[in-house]
Image (cartoon, helix red, strand yellow):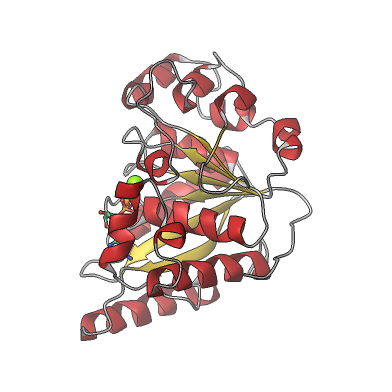
Amino acid sequence: AGELPHPPSPRIITIANQKGGVGKTTTTVNIAAGLALHGLGVLVIDLDPQGNASTALGIDHRAPDIASVYELLLGEVSLRETIQQSPNNDRLHCVPATLDLAGAEIELVSLVARENRLRNAIDEGALSDLGIDYVLIDCPPSLGLLTVNAMVAAKEVLIPIQCEYYALEGVGQLLRNIELVQAHLNPGLHVSTVVLTMYDGRTKLADQVAEEVRRHFGATVLNTIIPRSVKVSEAPGFGMTIIEYDPGSRGAMSYLDASREIALRGATV
Ligand code: ADP
Ligand code: MG
C-alpha cells in the first residue's frame, strides 16, 4: 500500500446509523486499519458499550481497571490516559469501551454540557503527539446522547448502509438528527461519506439498493462497495481486522480501496 496524504489537521469522522448490524463497527475498524496501513495515524473511539471495535483492534476491553471512554466522558481521566495502541499496527490506536458505558446514556443526562463531553475531552495536543491524522468514532445503534456526543465532536459523518431490504429505512430520521445537531450544537457537521456494505452480487436486490442509495446521496457514496464475505465477520474473533486477518481477500482489498478514496477526496465532497 502506498502512502496517502496527511490531512492538515486531524479529520474527525463519526460512523453512525441507528440501525444495528449494518456494518458500522466493521467499517470503522477496517477503514482505520486501511488508513494506518497507508501510513496514516488513526485513533478509533469506541462509543458502543459492546466494545466490538476495541475487540477487533486487539484490545482487551474486559481487563480490570482500564481507563475507557466511559471515564473520559465523565471527566475522570484525560484522553491520553485512555488511548491504547493496537498490537496489530503501531499507527493504530483506540479508546476502548467497557460495559459501564451502557449506563452512561442515562448518567450523562444530569451532567453539564452533556452533549459536548466528548468534544471537550478530545485533546488536540494528545492527537498531535501521537501523530493522529484520523479520529473515527464508532457509534452505538441508537440516536441517544452517546451518538449526539459523537456528532458534536466530529466534523464529518460516515453512514454505512447495508445492501438489504429496507436499507434506507431510518436514514431519514438519522439525517433529521444530523440537521438538529448542525442547527444547535455543531454547525460544521456534514455527511461526507456513505459506504455500501455487505453487497451480495448474486442478488438483484443488492444492485437495486445500491442504485437507490446513489440516487439519494449522489457523490457522497464511495465508488467502492464492500462485499459480503464470511472472512470479514471471522476476523474480530481473532482480535484483527480483515486487513490483518486475510490481506489478499476481497474484503480486505475493498476496505483498503474505501480508505484510499476517503483520504484522497478529502473532507468535503
Ligand atoms: P453494526 O456495528 O452496525 O451493528 P457490525 O459491523 O457489527 O454492524 O456488523 C454486523 C454483523 O455483520 C457482524 O457480525 C459483522 O461481522 C457482520 N459483517 C459486517 N460486514 C460484513 C461483511 N462485509 N461481510 C460479512 N459479514 C459482515
Ligand atoms: Mg457496532
Residue drawn at 56 percent across, 39 percent down: 152
Using the rendered image of the protein, determine whether residue 83 is visible from the camera's viewpoint. Answer: yes
Judge whether 222 appears above or below 146 on screen. Answer: below
Give the image location of residue 44, x and y in percent. 52, 43
Q: Nearer the viewer, residue 32 or 269?
A: 32
Residue drawn at 38 percent across, 55 percent down: 26
Residue drawn at 60 percent across, 55 percent down: 36
Q: Nearer the viewer, residue 220 or 184?
A: 220
From the viewer's perspective, is 221 left or right of 153?
left
Picture mark count: 0
- Quadrant where the C terminus is found in the figure: bottom right
From the viewer's perspective, is 185 left or right of 131?
left
Judge whether 125 appears above or below 86 on screen. Answer: above
Give the image location of residue 87, x and y in percent. 51, 42
Q: Give the image quarter of residue 109.
A: top left
Q: Quadrant of ligand 1?
A: bottom left
